[in-house]
Image (cartoon, rainbow, N blue to C red):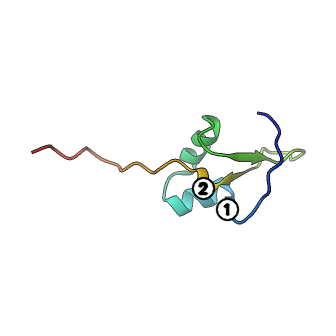
Amino acid sequence: MEKKNVKLDGNWVTPSALARDLEVAPSTVSNWIIRNQIDYVVFAGVERRRHLVDRRTAPEKRSVGKPAKKR
């Protein structure tokens, strides 16, 4: 990933906080990060990989279940 300067504000949250806000599984947010579907930053020099994600760039949440039958 290309390094870029990002101004962190209140829209940058942890992946788990975003998952809780959107009522999705934390693994869903992790998949968005892996697929580059959401803007994120990685903290360098941290023992475990730590991210912050931009809640403004989160994909729309899809509804769960079967599609409605057409009449």
For residue 23, above or below residue 66: below
At 26% across and 44% down in the image, what residue appears?
66
What residue is pinned by disc 1? 11
Mark 2 vs mark 1: which is more N-terminal?
1
Residue 65 position, x and y percent, is 30, 47
Q: For numbered disc 2, what is the local secondary structure?
A: helix
Q: For numbered disc 1, what is the local secondary structure?
A: loop
What residue is pinned by disc 2? 56
For residue 43, above or below residue 34: below
> Is 17 placed left or right of 51 in the picture?
left
- The amino acid at mark 1 is Asn
Q: Residue furthest bottom?
A: 10
Image quadrant where one finds the C terminus? top left
Residue 40 position, x and y percent, is 70, 47
Name the image quarter holding residue 32: top right
For residue 11, above or below residue 71: below
At 70% across and 66% down in the image, what residue appears?
10
**Viewer-proximal residue among 5 and 31:** 5
Residue 64 position, x and y percent, is 35, 49
**Viewer-proximal residue among 1 and 25:** 1
At 64% across and 53% down in the image, what residue appears?
15
